[in-house]
Image (cartoon, grey):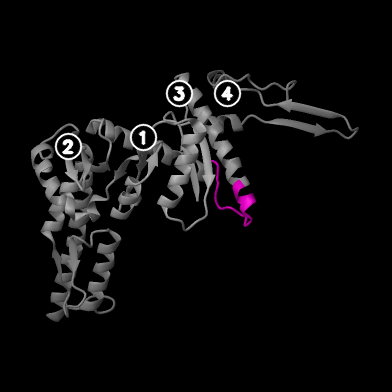
């Protein structure tokens, strides 16, 4: 397991490699202590995605102390799995979300913590429309199967194998499961005939959660908008891991010795630092290139050395294009020359 610490601007500062199959709370405290000591940090706010929220983890996090102060945290809530939030959300949804055109924020109390809610109407519309489209398509398929089964019972024949209620039920159940709508379209696998039920209550609940971000926090000095902004900054850490996986290709790791695995992670971490420095310099110069595109442009520059038949050497550098010269100027590096190389 790889952990990365970075500044708010996105510059990686520190990394650690942990053994796998270890609970987050057991690796979290030593890492926080290391960061606090190494970088003289006076305040730590843990921001975590939906995988960390549980009552056990909340209890463990609440017991953590940093420089004698309780650890502050912002944890995302997997709202679709926590039905206990429904009653709290209904009032907020009816009051702030049904006819809203702009992002709405709310705050409630839960388990002695603050429950922050953010609603984005444009996201809610997209999510609701996508789900309704899938539901309509599935129900249209179901109506066709109902019709074929009824006609078949009445003596009408179709090409191919004869349909059975069990076979249609299995096919429809798989389609509903693949669409991740099994909590709304309930397929009766025990019935002798093909049958399903649309759970209107589950559908209404899903629509209520559309476009909503739920966060649990113990921070007392931030407004709901600031809490949400801090959480969304977590996406930059996740982008760093995507860069490690894609552009830097940290995995798969063909090592089995711990020291070699850590060395591999260190090299990839240094590459991530260079990648982020490149991103910061491009941004500082108001350049529109992404780091990935900048590297693609730079990669086309080639320097070749050729050994001739009389053991004489000849060398040559790709003629730089305007966009390549512009790139080096933007990031504050001298353009490559044959003599320097």
Q: Which residue is drawn at 28% across and 67% down?
A: 174
Q: Residue at x 10, y 40 (%)?
A: 98
Between the residue at mark 2 and the residue at mark 4, the CA separation in whole angstroms equals: 49 Å
Q: Count the marks: how many?
A: 4
Q: Is residue 287 visible?
A: no
Q: Mark 1 points at which residue?
A: 233
* Residue 231 place in picture, x, y as percent: 32, 37
First along the sequence among labels 1 and 3: 1
Between the residue at mark 1 and the residue at mark 2, the CA separation in whole angstroms equals: 19 Å
* Residue 275 place in picture, x, y as percent: 53, 33
Q: Which of 113 and 95 is in front in this view?
A: 113
Q: Is residue 288 visible?
A: yes
Label disc, if present, on residue 15 of the rendered structure: none
How packed mark 1 is, by other alpha carbons closer than 10 Å (few <14, some 14-19, many 20 or more), is some
Between the residue at mark 1 and the residue at mark 3, the CA separation in whole angstroms equals: 17 Å
First along the sequence among labels 3 and 4: 3
Label disc, if present, on residue 324 of the rendered structure: 4
First along the sequence among labels 2 and 4: 2
Q: Which residue is drawn at 28% across and 76% down?
A: 160
Q: Give the range drawn in magenta.
A: 246-262
Q: In this view, does 71 lie above or below 1?
A: above
Judged left or right of residue 190, residue 247 is right
Q: Residue at x 62, y 22 (%)?
A: 320
Between the residue at mark 4 and the residue at mark 1, the CA separation in whole angstroms equals: 31 Å
Judged left or right of residue 45, residue 90 is left
Q: What element carries label 1?
A: loop
């Amino acid at each position: 397991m790889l952990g990365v610490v970075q500044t708010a601007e996105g510059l990686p500062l520190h990394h650690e490699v942990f053994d796998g199959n270890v609970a987050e709370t057991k690796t979290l405290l030593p890492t926080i202590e290391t960061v606090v000591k190494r970088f003289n940090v006076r305040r730590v706010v843990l921001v975590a995605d939906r995988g960390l929220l549980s009552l056990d983890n909340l209890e463990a996090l609440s017991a953590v102390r940093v420089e004698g102060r309780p650890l502050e945290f912002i944890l995302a809530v997997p709202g679709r799995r926590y039905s206990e939030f429904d009653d709290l959300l209904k009032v907020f949804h009816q009051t702030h979300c049904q006819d809203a055109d702009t992002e709405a924020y709310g705050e409630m109390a839960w388990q002695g913590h603050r429950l922050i809610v953010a609603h984005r109407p444009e996201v809610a519309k997209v999510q609701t429309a996508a789900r309704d489209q899938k539901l309509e398509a599935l129900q249209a398929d179901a109506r066709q199967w109902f019709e074929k089964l009824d006609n078949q019972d009445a003596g009408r024949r179709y090409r191919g194998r004869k349909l059975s209620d069990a076979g249609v039920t299995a096919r429809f159940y798989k389609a509903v499961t693949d669409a991740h709508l099994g909590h709304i379209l309930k397929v009766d696998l025990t019935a002798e005939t093909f049958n399903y039920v649309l759970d209107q209550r589950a559908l209404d609940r899903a629509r209520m959660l559309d476009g909503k971000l739920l966060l649990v926090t113990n921070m007392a000095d931030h407004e709901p908008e600031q809490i949400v902004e801090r959480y969304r900054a977590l996406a930059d850490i996740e982008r760093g891991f995507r860069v490690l996986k894609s552009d830097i290709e940290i995995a798969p790791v063909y090592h089995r010795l711990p020291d070699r695995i850590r060395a591999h992670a260190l090299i990839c971490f240094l590459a991530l630092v260079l990648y982020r420095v490149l991103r910061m310099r491009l941004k500082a110069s108001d350049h529109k290139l992404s780091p990935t595109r900048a590297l693609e442009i730079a990669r086309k520059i080639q320097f070749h050395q050729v050994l001739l038949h009389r053991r004489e050497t000849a060398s040559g550098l790709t003629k730089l294009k305007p966009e390549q010269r512009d790139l080096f100027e933007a990031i504050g590096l001298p353009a490559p020359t044959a003599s320097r190389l």
